[in-house]
């Protein structure tokens, strides 16, 4: 029973999101086809903050442009939900995007149809409010329909702590450190290129865009050039080879350390420094990762080569720490 | 890279650190051109003095395996032959240890090595 139900629940959430987007497309097509003769040519398609029209599209191109946007967002949202095996936040977001886009394109059609010329078309805050309401309603309907999703990491019975970390025999009074650089060269190159582009842009296009690019590049580098260290303090992830910023899991917060294969998109919802309910950490690539179960019950993950050694050492150090803090106990 | 320090061993701590890093270079855990952890960070991890770590790094520099640069820290020599060199140095150390264990004098050992070199 459980075996046959699993694939169904895996497809349910993406199907719900896809259906929401198809509904939005259908609503747009219905509105467009019924009001086609009332529409001005060109159609007002872009609106300034005050609600007045400030950009226009020819009547012939309008339906293709609108459907194009709707379908691209449909593919994007459905793909994300599928890749994360129905993560609830993404299901909600996907439905909200469908509702918002659908309501906006329908409002654009209706407002255009009601106006004499395209210049007089308005799309005010009232429309935005209505669109947000539709988005909220879509989310409220879509999330329960999408099923429970992967939610807690414990809901993966077929992916247990597969490799019970090999024992690491610590000699008495021995001091040990395991450390290794981890990162993604292509992403790092991209980050450095962004910083360089930022430096170039500063004299050319003003410091706002320059600093923006440079900060983005630095953030990218920071998430993808890390050093992972296991020592008497616990598990430490340093960024950019600097002492700080860093993420440190002290030994006394570690329940168990294991090595496991991690898929960034599926397990952490993407690459870089990520946090999803019940799990956080650095996902720089798919493959072996040190997975630490904390005393709080959640997990900390960091993908790094030779994770098996790191996990074994971390487990042994945590055990030594427990024995030290509870004298006479075992 | 795994560094284990045995405080009870007669081998100086700096040499133990050097041996561990050399092993990591030899088995390509640390690749040529890669930066080693900062001496201060490694010393803090191991609970030893910074100078102990620096002594180990200095030894590796003398062996031509790493470069120490002001501001950049310790970097593995960007020579693709570095792992091989590290293995060779490891081999020499093993040879010396064997000779000492067998009671072979230093002069005798050098003579043996010379003979080996002259052989082919």
Image: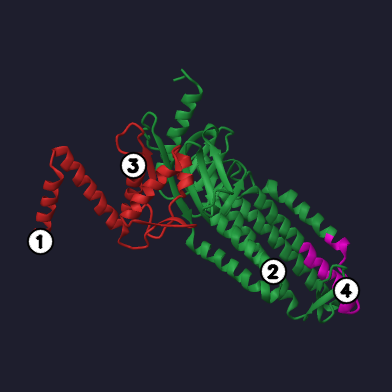
Asked if disc 4 and disc 1 are in contact, CB closer than 8 Å, the reply is no
Query: Which residue position is annotated with label 2?
Result: A209
Left or right: B10, with A106 as reference point: left
Prevailing secondary structure of the magenta residues: helix
**Location of residue A189 in the rendering, given as x and y in whole percent from the top left corner:** 52, 65
Q: Helix, strand or loop at disc 2?
A: helix
Q: Mark 1 lies on which chain?
A: B
| Display colour for chain B | red
Q: Helix, strand or loop at disc 4?
A: loop
Tell how many labels. Answer: 4
From the viewer's perspective, is residue A246 above or below residue A102? above
Residue A121 tag number: 4
Q: Which quadrant holds residue B116? A: bottom left
Are discs 4 and 3 both within one chain?
no
Asked if disc 4 and disc 2 are in contact, CB closer than 8 Å, the reply is no
Q: How crowded is mark 4: few (under 14 residues within 10 Å), some or many (20 or more)?
A: many
Query: Which residue position is annotated with label 3?
Result: B16
For the residues labelled 4 and 3, the Cα–Cα distance comes to 78 Å
Between discs 4 and 2, the one toward the N terminus:
4
From the viewer's perspective, is residue A218 above or below residue A9? below
In the image, which lettered chain appears green? Answer: A
Asked if disc 2 and disc 1 are in contact, CB closer than 8 Å, the reply is no
Query: Which residue position is annotated with label 1?
Result: B120
Q: Mark 4 lies on which chain?
A: A
Can I make out residue B1 in this image?
A: no
């Amino acid at each position: 029973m459980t075996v046959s139900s699993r694939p169904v629940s895996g497809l349910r959430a993406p199907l719900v999101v896809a259906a929401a987007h198809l509904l939005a497309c259908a609503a747009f097509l219905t509105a467009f086809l019924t009001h086609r003769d009332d529409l001005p040519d060109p159609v007002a398609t872009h609106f300034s903050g005050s609600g007045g029209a400030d950009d226009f599209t020819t009547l012939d191109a309008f339906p293709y442009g609108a459907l194009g946007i709707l379908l691209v967002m449909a593919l994007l949202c459905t793909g994300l939900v599928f890749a994360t095996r129905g993560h609830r936040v993404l299901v909600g977001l996907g439905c909200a995007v469908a509702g918002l886009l659908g309501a906006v394109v329908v409002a654009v059609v209706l407002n255009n149809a009601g106006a004499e010329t395209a210049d007089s078309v308005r799309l005010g805050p009232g429309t935005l409010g209505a669109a947000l309401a539709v988005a909220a309603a879509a989310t409220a309907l879509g999330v329960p329909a999408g099923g429970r999703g992967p939610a807690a990491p414990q809901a993966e019975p077929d992916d247990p702590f597969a490799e019970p970390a090999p024992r690491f025999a610590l000699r008495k009074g021995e001091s040990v450190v395991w450390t290794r650089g981890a990162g993604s060269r292509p992403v790092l190159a991209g980050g450095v290129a962004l910083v360089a582009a930022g430096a170039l842009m500063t004299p050319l296009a003003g410091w706002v865009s320059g600093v923006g690019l440079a900060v983005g590049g630095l953030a990218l580098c920071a998430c993808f050039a890390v050093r992972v260290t296991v020592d008497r303090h616990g598990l430490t992830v340093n960024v950019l080879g600097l002492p700080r910023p860093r993420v440190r899991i002290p030994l006394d917060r570690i329940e168990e350390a294991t090595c496991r294969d991690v898929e960034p998109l599926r397990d952490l919802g993407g690459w870089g420094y990520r946090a999803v309910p019940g799990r956080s950490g650095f996902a720089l690539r798919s493959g072996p990762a040190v997975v630490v179960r904390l005393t709080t019950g959640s997990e900390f993950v960091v993908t790094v080569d030779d994770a098996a050694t790191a996990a074994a050492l971390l487990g042994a150090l945590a055990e030594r720490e427990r024995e030290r803090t509870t004298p006479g106990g075992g | 890279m795994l560094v284990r320090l045995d405080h009870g061993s007669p081998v100086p701590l700096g040499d133990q650190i050097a041996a561990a890093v050399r092993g990591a270079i030899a088995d390509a855990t640390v690749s040529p051109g890669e930066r080693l952890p900062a001496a201060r960070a490694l010393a803090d991890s191991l609970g030893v003095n910074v100078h102990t770590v620096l002594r180990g790094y200095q030894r590796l520099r003398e062996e031509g395996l790493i470069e120490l640069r002001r501001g950049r820290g310790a970097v593995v020599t960007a020579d693709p032959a570095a792992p091989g060199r590290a293995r060779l140095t490891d081999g020499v150390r093993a040879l010396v240890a064997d000779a000492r264990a067998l009671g072979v004098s230093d002069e005798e050992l050098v003579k043996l090595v010379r003979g080996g070199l002259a052989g082919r």
